[in-house]
Image: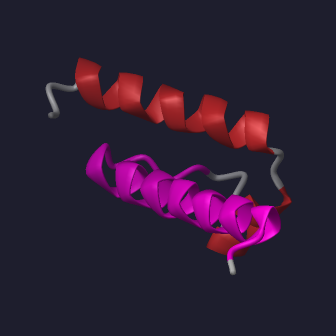
């Protein structure tokens, strides 16, 4: 049985992996965050906004 907490955690984990992948793609590693674990402390809204910014940067750099 999948509970809502498990679903939310799984989605959050996927978003964090996506952010790390995008950072590598656009060659952008932020100075203010040194480890992936630091992303766990960010709010869902901040993660979503940061992911959107990385997607926008990838588009501007001519990525997929």
| Highlighted range, magenta | 2-30
Tell me if residue 35 can be seen.
no
Which residue occupies the foreground of this view, 29 or 50?
50
Residue in front for this viewpoint, 42 or 26: 42
For the point 42% across and 51% down, the residue is 23
Please count the marks in the image. Answer: 0
* Quarter location, residue 18: bottom left
Which of these two is toward me, 38 or 45? 45
Which quarter shows the C terminus? top left
**Residue 40 point in image, percent of width and height:** 77, 64
Q: Is residue 60 left or right of residue 5?
A: left
Residue 15 visible in the current orientation: yes
Question: Which image quadrant for residue 15?
Answer: bottom right
The answer to whether residue 40 is above or below residue 64 is: below
Q: Position of residue 19 (x, y in %)?
A: 49, 52
Give the overall secondary structure of the magenta segment: helix
Q: How is the image coloured?
A: secondary structure
Identify which residue is drawn at 52% across, 62% down. Answer: 14
- Residue 55 vs residue 26, the one in the foreground: 55
Q: Residue furthest bottom?
A: 1
Q: Is residue 60 left or right of residue 54?
A: left
| Image spot of residue 58 (x, y percent) | 29, 31
| Quarter in which the N terminus is drawn | bottom right
At 85% across and 60% down in the image, what residue appears? 41
| Residue 5 located within the stretch drawn in magenta | yes
Residue 42 forms part of the magenta stretch: no
55 to the left or right of 49: left
Residue at figure coordinates x 72%, y 52% from the top left = 32
Looking at the picture, how far across and down is residue 31, in whole percent? 64, 52
């Amino acid at each position: 049985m999948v509970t809502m907490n498990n679903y939310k955690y799984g989605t959050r984990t996927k978003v964090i992996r996506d952010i790390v992948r995008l950072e590598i793609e656009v060659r952008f590693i932020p100075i203010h965050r040194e480890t992936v674990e630091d992303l766990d402390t960010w709010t869902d809204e901040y993660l979503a906004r940061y992911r959107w910014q990385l997607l926008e940067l990838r588009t501007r750099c001519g990525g997929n």
